[in-house]
Amino acid sequence: MNKTLYLHRTGDNTCVSHDGYIQMGAMGHSVERHIELNPTINWIETYWVPDVFMNRYKRATFQAHERVSGGKSSIESRPRDFPDEGASRGLLSGKPPQ
């Protein structure tokens, strides 16, 4: 079974490889050359590239630092991705179900 990975053309002689979730590398050669150099992988050229992982998620150690330095309120005052999640169980400050 072959692996399937993705390539995004960033210029005439540059490309970025990714696995659909995380960028894996920036190459100093074209998509065609990259496929030629790595023939055992099923490469698919994409028009999109995922965000750099470090820009999507805060490190767990930084979250712990926030908790210690700013107190519990600094964590709870951040905007939440799903503000009503957990409200039915009384876990969050979101609106309780009616």
Image (tube, grey):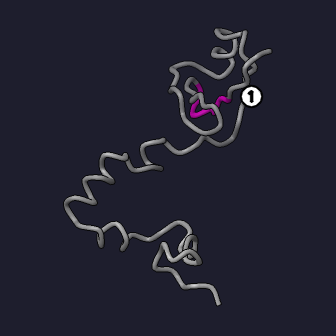
Magenta stretch: dominant SS? strand
Query: Residue 26 at what x, y percent from top left?
Result: 50, 27
Q: Is residue 37 above or below residue 71?
A: above
Q: Is residue 32 above or below residue 89?
A: above
Q: Residue at x 22, y 65 (%)?
A: 70
**Segment tinted magenta in the rendering:** 6-12
Q: Residue lying furthest left in this view?
A: 69
Q: Residue lying furthest right in this view?
A: 1
Count all numbered tags in the image, as a single digit: 1
Magenta-colored stretch includes residue 8: yes
Query: Residue 83 at what x, y percent from top left?
Result: 53, 74
Q: Residue lying furthest front in this view?
A: 89
Magenta-colored stretch includes residue 66: no
Number of other residues with Cα within 10 Å of mark 1, as a class: few under 14, some 14 to 19, many 20 or more: few
Horizontal side of residue 75 vs 20, given as left or right: left
Query: Residue 66 at what x, y percent from top left?
Result: 27, 58
Query: Residue 38 at what x, y percent from top left?
Result: 66, 11
> Label 1, on which residue?
44
Quarter placement of the N terminus: top right
Q: Residue at x 46, y 79 (%)?
A: 93
Horizontal side of residue 51 vs 60, given as left or right: right
Q: Is residue 78 above or below residue 33?
A: below
Viewer-proximal residue, 92 or 31?
A: 92
Quarter placement of the C terminus: bottom right
